[in-house]
Amino acid sequence: MKHENTAMLSVGFAFCGSFCTIKSATEAMKNLLDTYRVTPIFSEAVQHTDTRFGKAETIMQEIESLCGRPAIKSIVEAERIGPEKLFDLLIIAPCTGNTLAKLSLGIIDATVPMAAKAHLRNARPLLIAPASNDALSVGLRHIGALTMRKNVFFVPFGQDDPFTKPTSLIADFSRIPNAVLSALNKEQLQPMLLGH
Ligand SMILES: Cc1cc2nc3c(=O)[nH]c(=O)nc-3n(C[C@H](O)[C@H](O)[C@H](O)COP(=O)(O)O)c2cc1C
C-alpha cells in the first residue's frame, strides 16, 4: 500500500550528538508535527553534554514540548519499540559517525542503536540523516554497509565544506519530509548523493 494519507502514522525522531546540527534537525522535525505523531529519542551524548550550542536540559525540554510527549532516553525504554511496534518509521537526525558505526557493526550499547535494532526487528523503515566530519574517511564503510541493509534509507547528503573539511558529509535536513514519505513506501529518496 502506498502511504499518502499519513495522518495516523507514528514517527520516532532520534537525536545524536552532532550538536551544531541539532537546531536544523529540530526545525525539520517541526515540519513533521502536523502530519505524524512524533516521539523524540535522545542519545546519551545529547542527554548529558552541555556545549556552546546549548544546554542539554534546554534542548531536550524544547523538543519534548514541541512533540507534546516525553522522550525515550534509555536502552530499556528503547527496547519497547520492538514488541510494542511503537513507530511506523524511525528517523535518526542528526546521526553521528559514532552511531553510524554502531549501526553498521551491530553494537547496541546505547539508546539510539537500541531504538534502531528494536524498530528494524519489525521490518519497518529506518531513515538516517548523517552529519559527521569523518563520514568520507572512517565513516564511509559504515554508510556503504548500511545502504545494503534492508529497510534502511538515507536522507540525501553531500559534502558541506569540501575544501576546508574534505571528509565531512551532512544530510540536507530540508529534505526530511520527502525522505520520510519515500521511506514509508520503502523507497530511497533520489538523488541520494547531493552535488554542488
Ligand atoms: C560540540 C560538539 C560537536 C560535535 N559534532 C559532531 C558532529 O557533527 N558529528 C559527529 O559525528 N560527532 C560530533 N561530535 C562528537 C559526538 O558528540 C560524539 O562522538 C558522541 O560520542 C556521539 O554520541 P552519540 O552518537 O551517541 O550521540 C561533536 C561533539 C561535540 C562536543
Image (cartoon, rainbow, N blue to C red):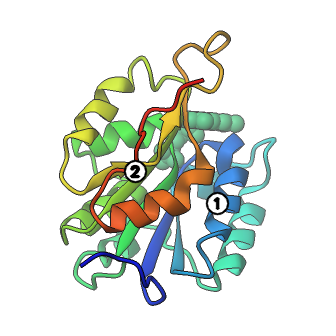
Image quarter where the C terminus lies is top right
13 sits to left or right of 64: left
**Mark 2 is on which residue type?**
Leu
- Residue 37 appears at what percent x and percent y? 52, 83
Furthest-bottom residue in this view: 8
- Residue 73 appears at what percent x and percent y? 50, 68
Which secondary structure lies at badge 1? helix
Q: In which quarter of the image is residue 64?
A: bottom right
Q: Is residue 55 above or below residue 148?
A: below
In this figure, what is the number of numbered marks? Answer: 2
- Give me the disc on residue 189: 2
Q: Is residue 105 above or below residue 112?
A: above
- Residue 145 appears at what percent x and percent y? 23, 35
113 sits to left or right of 93: left
As rendered, which of 61 and 161 lies closer to the eye?
161
As rendered, which of 72 and 116 lies closer to the eye?
116
Callout 1: few (<14), some (14-19), or many (20+) C-alpha neighbours within 10 Å? some
167 sits to left or right of 66: left
Q: Is residue 45 above or below residue 182?
A: above
**Mark 1 is on which residue type?**
Ala
Q: Is mark 2 within 8 Å of ligand 1?
A: no
- Earlier in the chain: of badge 2 and badge 1, it is 1
As rendered, which of 111 and 81 lies closer to the eye?
81
Q: Mark 1 points at which residue?
A: 28
Residue appearing at x 24%, y 79% in the figure:
1
- Give me the disc on residue 113: none
